[in-house]
Amino acid sequence: MIEKIRRHPIIRRATTLARFYLRGTLRVLSGYVVLRLIARTAQEMSDDDATHMAAAMSYYALVSLFPLTLGLISITSFIADDAHTQQTIIDWVASFLPGSESLIEANIETVLESRETVGAVAIFGLFWSGSAIFGGITRSVNRAWDVHKDRPLPISKARQMLMAGLTGCLFLCSTSISAFLRSYERFAYINIPYAGALVESSSVVILYASSFVLILIVFLMLYKFTPNTKTSWQYIWVGALVGAALFEITKNMFIWYLNTFTNFGNVYGTLATVVVFMLWAYLSGLILILGAELSSEYERVRRGARRGVLLID
């Protein structure tokens, strides 16, 4: 009996129309939620003064660049000091800091010349000084989650140094992957002539993918462990994914812009490299803040909370 009713033309027609309008309503609601999330994120960035926070982060990045670079390269140079590995390190660091290749290379050469005088205490001091950038990141991410109380100074500094150390571990992993791929390319060209081009293409894809995954992991770690409040993986992945994608897109566009349209050397002279670095650090800071604001607002939207409210479980 029930089956006959379900098969009745009028019932079938009504069911079809209901499904059609339901799907359309869900699409509209979905689009509305996305637009509302974008609008709330933009408003939060304005309220939290994201541009000035990004400018502060670019300053901290400049102050922290040399200590962190010296610390990371000092550790790496004790493990592998051949010219090929050193060039891999330079290329990897430069890939995340477009336009700053000469600045980084000069510092790496200085470290490699004097690495025998760099001990464990000196490396600890370098990471202590270099962790300043993570202090700026902590304040910016806390503001995105509307947290206005910092952790006690000893705990805060310890967490900043831990983040610097974890970033260094990711650096070493990525450098190892790059070095292995380059060695495999040379091996393929020598021993497998017909597969050389295929290996090179595969290596490029793997390098781009590993770069994206590395940035995604860094964003996830920052959004999970930096705020002085509890955050959930189910909410922060949205901002981390968008932030990592924007970082890679912006990085390639920035490189293209530097190579195509401008020559900072004509305006800033010997300071051009520093200016380019700070400009890139500013853009990176904006992307990091955008991802944090997006993650925090995504959680509020999902939980039905007002914009800019500190959520406490």
Image (cartoon, rainbow, N blue to C red):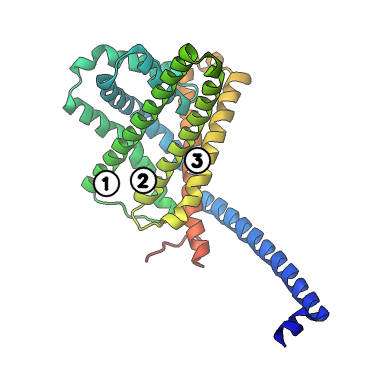
Along the horizontal axis of the image, is 136 left or right of 34?
left
Q: What residue type is disc 3 on?
A: Ala
In this figure, which residue is indicated by the disc labeled 1? 156
In this figure, which residue is indicated by the disc labeled 3? 244
Residue 102: percent from left, percent from top: 43, 15
- CA gap, disc 3 to disc 2? 18 Å
User: Which residue is painted at 35% across and 36% down in the image?
Assistant: 133
Image-quadrant location for residue 149: bottom left
Residue 51 visible in the picture: no
Q: Where 40 sits versus 91, above or below?
A: below
Q: Nearer the viewer, residue 181 or 242?
A: 181
Q: Quadrant of the C terminus?
A: bottom left
Q: What residue type is disc 2 on?
A: Thr
Q: Is mark 1 on a helix, strand or loop?
A: helix
User: Which residue is painted at 59% across and 53% down in the image?
Assistant: 38
The answer to whether mark 1 and mark 2 are in CB contact below 8 A is: yes
